[in-house]
Image: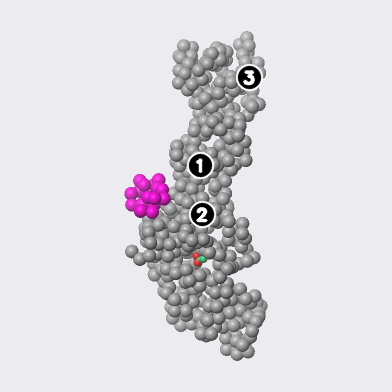
Amino acid sequence: MTEMIARFAPSPTGNLHIGSARTALINFISKSQNINSKLYLRIEDTDKKRSTVEFKNNIISGLKWLGIDWDNEPQIQSQNINRHLEIADRLLTDSKAYKCICSESKLSERRKKINSGEITSKKICISCEKNTEVQNLEKDYVIRIKIPFEGNGIIEDVVQGNVEIKNSEIDDYVLVRRDGTPTYMLSVVVDDHDLGVNFIIRGDDHLNNYFRQKFIYEYMNWKIPRYAHIPLIHGEDGSKLSKRHGAVNLIDLKAQGYLPEAIINNLILLGWSPKNQDDEIIQLNSIISKFDLKSLSKSASIFSYKKLDYFNNYYLRQEKNLGLFINYCQSNLNLQKYIEKDKEKLIRIFNIYKKDISQYGEMINIAKIYFNLNFETTKNEKFQEEFNNSFNNFLKLINNIKNWEYEVINLEIKNFLKKNNIKFPVFGKPIRYLLTNNYNGPSITDIFMILGREQSLERLNKYKISNGRLRR
Ligand code: GLU
């Protein structure tokens, strides 16, 4: 197989978005399918107004957290500006580009006419190219690429198939701004070429850019890479995935307590499925051996938080992932407190509740109940007579259990109910309520085990029966 040189090229203008993470993941999987391949990370920070170091760091740490790796140090695009400008100069010298001094108002006048259909050509500047005075200027101009009016551009895209558009649809876009800085459109091509990139996997919002960028390759006599433009992710209402749908940045998903394995599992099944549909739970190693980029659907995929919760619940239940829970607690101010107070207790709570939660963040409210030393139930419940009549005896029984072990407690409770001929719900629900302020939840033996003997008794003792009447 030929060597694949790929790259992931995020702009640090926001935190790592789940859609970008998917692009990175697919790049990583594709490169991992061939040992001779390389994947580079390039931070495209030429938009200085919107790019920040914090966003760059967030993207890098988000990728690392997901387990996505790359070769070499990340490349910082703004450090290559001189090289980009050198290519713009070459294009000028070769008459493949020209200087333009059109004012913004002149351009917008023309843009209006183009958009309304009054003018069929997309050529935005019609005067500068032929004006020698302008072409001889030393400063205060933008450099535009020259796009021929005739002919068509064709792409054989790995995901989108063959797509063709007329060159007349493309405008003479800007390569270098008036302030002398190169645009994304120029920098991306120069950097990809210089890195030897031969396979570009990116979002299909860049498909149109292919038809623009290919001219730089052609004018420079550079080999055009292969492309796979992958469809974007949409929310369940069909619109582009955004905050309205839920957390969309990796940092927020991590803070809520989602696991990398669940995110990867969910992302890879968007628009692709393994041949055996039962392999719905699929991890990176197995994805690498089974994934086939060519079979990725070219229509937008729907991101479902319900599905993500399902996968997350699956992965957080795994015994081997307990360490991830501890890491999460250490990074969460609320849970950190509990870890410091009683780590074993927090782990007991987690192990009992994990089957019912889909994010680690849910543990905050659950643990709160068990760590509250001034625990009170919220309502003054009066339970059924049958319960009240035997509650004091039950208390005595619990008091007498010295060996606080699951099997022992379970057996004692069972025998007590049998002896007194009490049905479990009559007893179980109120006891659970007195211990946790909730009629539903884990078995009362589990709750006893979480709380320990002393605290269990303390909570139960708050509900006393005297002369058959309640006293709180
Ligand atoms: N920096 C571009 C972006 O974040 C990606 C460019 C590309 O993949 O060609 O959208």
- Label 3 is placed on what type of residue? Lys
How far across and how far down the image is residue 188, in percent? 52, 69
Q: As shown in the figure, which amino acid type bears the numbered disc 2?
A: Leu
Q: Which residue is at a point 47% across and 22% down the rendered structure image?
A: 406
Q: Quadrant of residue 375?
A: top right
Q: Point out residue 109 in the picture as x, y percentages from the top left corner.
A: 63, 78
Image coords of residue 428 (percent x, y): 51, 22
Is residue 363 visible in the rendered image? The answer is yes
How would you rate the neighbour count of disc 1 (Cα within 10 Å): few for under 14, some for 14-19, many for 20 or more? some
As drawn, the label of residue 63 is: 2
Badges 1 and 3: C-beta atoms under 8 Å apart? no
Mark 3 lies on a secondary structure that is loop
User: Looking at the rendered structure, which numbered label has been put on residue 324?
Assistant: 1
Q: Reply above or below: 139 against 155.
A: below
Query: Foreground residue, 325 or 125?
Result: 325
Left or right relative to 244: residue 282:
left
Task: Please tell me which of labels 3 and 2 falls first in the chain.
Answer: 2
Q: Earlier in the sequence, mark 1 or mark 3?
A: 1
| Residue underneath mark 3 | 462
- Give SS at disc 2: helix
Identify which residue, 352 or 166, lies in the foreground: 352
**Secondary structure found at label 1:** helix
Label 2, label 1: how far apart the Cα atoms are: 17 Å
Provide residue 252's location: percent of width, then percent of height.
57, 49
Tell me the crowding category of disc 2: few under 14, some 14 to 19, or many 20 or more residues within 10 angstroms, Cα based: many
- Image point 51% across, 83% down: which residue? 96
> Image point 58% across, 61% down: which residue?
12
